[in-house]
């Protein structure tokens, strides 16, 4: 907790504070991966991409719409393979909801990002659909075009 969790979240909070100090409201994308098979049962998950939310579904739903339109072969779902709540997650409730930031927790099935080619492909998919979702919601100004984001 003291070596990883707290320093990481302190840096995220500091980066978001720097955005706020210059009048910018970023979009929070928390990105995780999940296993193809459930550990307890060994059952295979159909979902390849999960777009998770807790109280505010807007960005996750907009992103799902964009994924379905641009990448119809991707098996994407809302709140799969997990859900977000105040007990099981930290980033979305603390950094997203409390700050009133547009947000989504993105879960990518880890066998799809196990090599560089998959990582580059999914980075492009996430980037394109997140930007399109921002546009759909009128949040284009929240997307950095210069690539000069505060580093976490």
Image (cartoon, grey):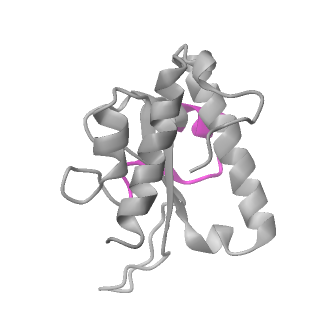
Q: Nearer the viewer, residue 102 or 67?
A: 102
Residue lying at the far left of the rendered structure: 87
Q: Is residue 105 visible?
A: no
Q: Is residue 78 visible?
A: yes
Q: Nearer the viewer, residue 39 or 32?
A: 32
At 78% from the left edge and 29% from the top edge, which residue is drawn? 146
**Residue numbers of the magenta segment:** 64-81
Residue lying at the far top of the rendered structure: 138
Q: Residue 145 at what x, y percent from top left?
A: 75, 27
At 62% from the left edge and 40% from the top edge, which residue is drawn? 150
55 relative position to 6: left or right: left
At 35% from the left edge and 61% from the top edge, which residue is drawn? 6
Residue 9 quadrant = bottom left
Residue 43: in magenta span:
no
Q: Residue 7 at what x, y percent from top left?
A: 42, 61
132 relative position to 78: left or right: right
**How many numbered marks are there?**
0
Residue 70: in magenta span:
yes
Residue 94 quadrant = top left
Q: Residue 70 at what x, y percent from top left?
A: 69, 36
At 53% from the left edge and 35% from the top edge, which residue is drawn? 63
Which quadrant holds the N terminus? bottom left
72 relative position to 49: left or right: right
């Amino acid at each position: 907790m003291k070596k990883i969790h707290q320093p990481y979240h302190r840096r995220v909070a500091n980066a978001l504070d720097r955005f706020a100090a210059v009048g910018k409201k970023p979009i929070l994308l928390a990105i995780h991966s999940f296993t193809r098979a459930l550990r307890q049962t060994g059952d295979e998950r159909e979902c390849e991409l999960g777009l998770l939310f807790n109280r505010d579904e807007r960005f996750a739903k907009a992103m799902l719409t964009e994924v379905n339109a641009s990448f119809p072969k991707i098996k994407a779902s809302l709140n799969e393979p997990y859900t977000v709540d105040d007990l099981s997650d930290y980033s979305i409730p603390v950094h997203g909801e409390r700050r009133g930031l547009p947000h989504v927790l993105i879960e990518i099935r880890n066998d799809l990002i196990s090599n560089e080619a998959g990582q580059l492909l999914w980075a492009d998919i996430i980037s394109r659909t997140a930007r399109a979702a921002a546009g759909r919601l009128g949040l284009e100004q929240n997307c950095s075009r210069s690539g000069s984001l505060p580093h976490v």
